[in-house]
Amino acid sequence: LLGPFSPSLAGSELAKQRGELDAGLPRPDVAAVAAACAVVRDAVRAGALASAHDVSDGGLACALAECAIGAGLGCKVDLQPLRERGCSPEEALFGEGSGGFLVSGERAALEAIGAVHLGAVGGGAIEIAAGDRGVSLPLADAERAWRSLGERVERSA
């Protein structure tokens, strides 16, 4: 995880689903977000990253799923570094905020750009540990659910 990402449920997709959009939004540190964008841009241009994905709608859980489905590779992640920043497991999983990038690549290259290590890419499942709880979903199940979304939306319309 790279950037000044400080996940908040205010204004998030989860808050929207719960009917809780009246909580106001956190103020982004525009200079820190711009700096993180520049670091990602430069790392991509230098070939230092295998992947980069912004953390936006749906938070880190959705970004992880989108990356895993897109690459056809699972992941094993521990959200403890976000917990150490004061996030609840729910905020760490579904909170949204400016300037967060989920990146992958060689560990030394990631450390050189200041990324916080959350886990590893590989395997056939999306595995996320958040405090004393966790979730594991076979990648094939996640992909099937993601690909069927359009069909399910059309049927309900």
Image: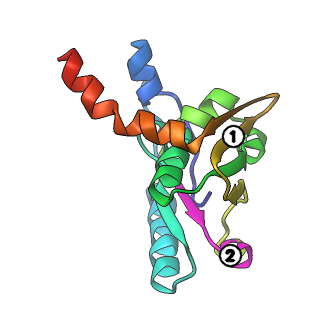
Q: Position of residue 69 (x, y in %)?
A: 48, 50
Q: Position of residue 154 (x, y in %)?
A: 19, 25
Residue extending farthest to the top is 19
State the residue position of label 1.
128
| Residue type, label 2 | Glu
| Residue type, label 1 | Ile
Residue 41 visible in rendering: yes
Front residue (pair 37, 65): 65
- On residue 144, the disc is none
The residue positioned 55% from the left and 74% from the top of the image is: 49
State the residue position of label 2.
106
The picture quadrant where one finds residue 153 is top left
144 to 108, vertically: above or below: above
Q: Quadrant of the N terminus?
A: bottom right
Left or right, 17 with respect to 136, comes to left
Number of marks? 2
Which region shows up in magenta?
Answer: 98-110
The picture quadrant where one finds residue 41 is bottom left
Left or right, 53 with respect to 74, comes to left
Q: Quadrant of the C terminus?
A: top left
Colouring rule applied to residues: rainbow
